[in-house]
Amino acid sequence: MSRVQNVVIESVRTVLGWVPERWLPGGSPDPLITRRGAVGRQVSRLDGALKVRGQARFAAEVPMEGLCYAALVHSPITRGRISSLDTSAAEAASGVVLAMTHRNMPRLGSLPLISVTNMSAAGASALPIMQDAEIGYNGQVLALVLAETQEQADHAASLIRIDYEAAPARTHFEDAKATARTPASILVEKNHVVVGDPQRELAQAAWRVDNVYRTPGHNHNAIELHAVTLAWEGDTLTIHDATQMIASSANAVARLFGLKKENVRVFSPYVGGGFGGKGLWDHQIVAIAAARLAGRPVRLALSRDGVYRMIGGRTPTEQRVAVAADAAGNLTALVHTGHSVMPPYAAAPEQYTLTARALYRSKSYEFVQHHLDLDIVPNTFMRAPGESVGSFAVESAIDELAHEMGIDPIELRLRNEPDRHPISGTPFSQRALVQAYRDGAARFGWERRAKTPRARRDGEWLIGMGCATGSFPYARMPGASVGIRLTREGTATVSCSAQDMGMATSTVQIQHAADRLGLPMEAISFEMGDSALPAAPMAGGSAQTVSIAAAIAAAAEKLTGELLRLAGNSSPLAGLRAGEVRLVDRALTSIEDSSRTESIRAIMSRASRDEVAVTASGSPPLELLKFAMHSHSANFCEVRVSEVTGEIRVTRLLGAFDCGAILNPNTATSQFKGGMIMGIGLALTEETLFDERSGRIMNATLADYHIPSHLDVPDIEVIWTGIPDPRSPLGARGIGEIGITGVAAAIANAVFNATGKRVRDLPITLDKLL
Ligand code: MOS
């Protein structure tokens, strides 16, 4: 995003401020907010049985005739070049089909980086992929071997001899600060924002905290490893991928290989976890190129180590948060600044200062982020990028201020609850964080929290409670389209290239379509996971559900218009317009006068039609520029910390969510819980250990990189306000990423309440408490 785009977005916001609400999408609330049937029901995942029986076929399982298997060679040096290369031993090894290096890799341009302003871009890295002898980071792919079996490929890859000429590399976080970049924008927000005079307010304040918080890098650990199975047939390419971005991947691959868009087809019906990591990376590109050179279908499944080496994760951050308050506890300054790593060839700015902008009323503010260039695998989006680690810093600081002032941390938050967006001044579409806190505190038993640290114990175990706010912006992606085919019998097929990484995309959209089309759920099928279908946006930014929902709403309206046209003048519906009728019980009925109705069967029979098919796109998502729209949460945590060993146990965790209408309590609960479990990892165990001397990740295995295990996870309780957002399709906001947000701070605050020790450096390991 450039300065020009900043100006454009701000101007659009200003103009939208004058536009009457009813002219905007969401201006008149979605009628389905109040008319509920299948939506809101506790439906189990419709593809659950397939998955449990092993019948859901993932990318690495797709059978193909004549398939060969790929293995990769990763750079062991961080920066420099290949000085000599010998693939002869590999080529002579048994079963080898092809050895590919920069010497025989086809010449390609670079991938356009995924961005908020280019919905058809998908690349996670702009570095050339196996195009020359240059090496930009430790782990970069330098060679690929294809063989008849995976074992033969793995062995042959180990026989490739490469000599290197190493060059000095930038690997030190601290040193890189001297040449930090300060971008104009962070995603679509202006980066450096100053309101009032925060320096003066901090200097004059009755109360103030001013500290630095550090979070380490994190790697993606989806259970399904990144994998592709693909084949060329002439100039057409079929790719079975594990991806969060089907349509944009197909686009990007077509452009990169100079193919017609319709000649690249990406399938990805099931994805075993994504969290931002399942984008378009080097492995798909080298596999596609190798398949072309070999004239054979190819399977490439990364090893766990491979994922660490060449798929980026969350960048480390160093954040300063300064908060000041007057004697009455009203905030007078909120400053959040910091450094994170983002090489210029990466796409994800780790927007850690965005979260605080929507949280508190204050007399003054300052926000700014600086990017450090290191020679590393390009970092990328990882569940609640920015918000997850930004909320750790800000919500720890608020807790510290409350402690200094001797007031309850919930009380301090409630006193500073804003009534409009604190920075832009736009009204909130719906915000009931206060209610989330009240409900959560009552349910959790917050009144049992000791006001002073170290006041509760059970033998050697110190017991503490903490809380923290989470906030995650609502988004709806432009350009989502869906097709609906309605038959005379009253069955419908809804289709778009949507992705499901486990969150029950098809289940929830079938619930939605049932209500929108007035059909039972059993009468609806949902086709997805295929780039040949109408294009859905990527599954990201917790935005897929409403993005597709808006497209289904538009298609249903178009379908209604089409049915009215077919009904013609002899129908009881004659003269009515699309907005004046609705589909209920396999009939089209006037909203005003339910006696004016005609069945779908009757309408289609008279018109001699077996089916009606439409395709439509969702309206432009202007609501998110006119209103401040965020999912909110109040997180509550209880910990026990051993005074003898420093061992930390999260004994209770409760999330009180305010995320609009909940479309499916069953699948929403697992989204929230999954995020909260990742929050436990963020707080206590997860850390990519990066060797600043070698530029190499030292713990590239699940044995050494600790994600929470079952024993680390207590019973988690999830509640929600369920208040529909009047500005969004179905009244819903995102629920994918809010779960992790605020959890690390709630845990850190609970640890402080238990022990009196404030850890500002994640993860909170036992050595930091002794
Ligand atoms: Mo997400 S980090 O938008 O998958």
Image (cartoon, grey):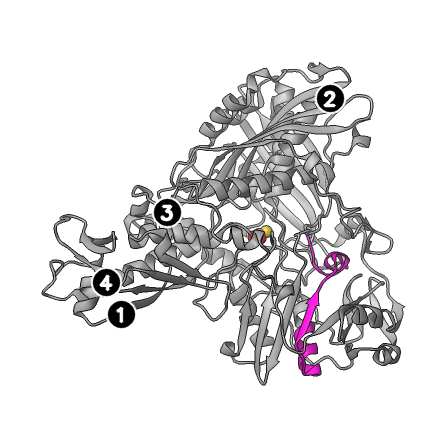
Which of the two labelled residues, at mark 1 and mark 2, occupies the earlier sequence position?
1
Q: Which mark is residue 610?
A: 1
Mark 3 C-beta closer than 8 Å to ligand 1:
no
Answer with left or right where residue 196 lies relative to residue 382: left
> In the displayed image of the protein, which residue is found farthest to the front?
53
Q: Is residue 537 magenta?
A: no
Q: Position of residue 167 (x, y in %)?
A: 86, 65
Q: State the residue position of label 3.
A: 730
Report the mark closest to the observer, 4 or 2. 4
Q: Which residues lie in the magenta part?
A: 287-313
Label 2 amino acid? Thr
Cα separation between marks 1 and 2: 70 Å
Residue 339 seen from this side:
yes
- Name which quarter of the figure residue 143 lies in: bottom right
Q: Is residue 308 magenta?
A: yes
Answer with left or right where residue 507 lies relative to residue 208: left
Name the secondary structure under disc 4.
helix
Q: State the residue position of label 4.
A: 561
Report the mark closest to the observer, 1 or 3. 1
Which of the two labelled residues, at mark 4 and mark 2, occupies the earlier sequence position?
4
Label 3 amino acid? Leu
Which of the two labelled residues, at mark 4 and mark 1, occupies the earlier sequence position?
4
Q: Which mark is residue 424?
A: none
- Name which quarter of the figure residue 579 lies in: bottom left
Name the secondary structure under disc 1.
loop
Label 1 amino acid? Asp
Q: Which mark is residue 755?
A: 2
Mark 2 C-beta closer than 8 Å to ligand 1:
no
Label 4 amino acid? Gly
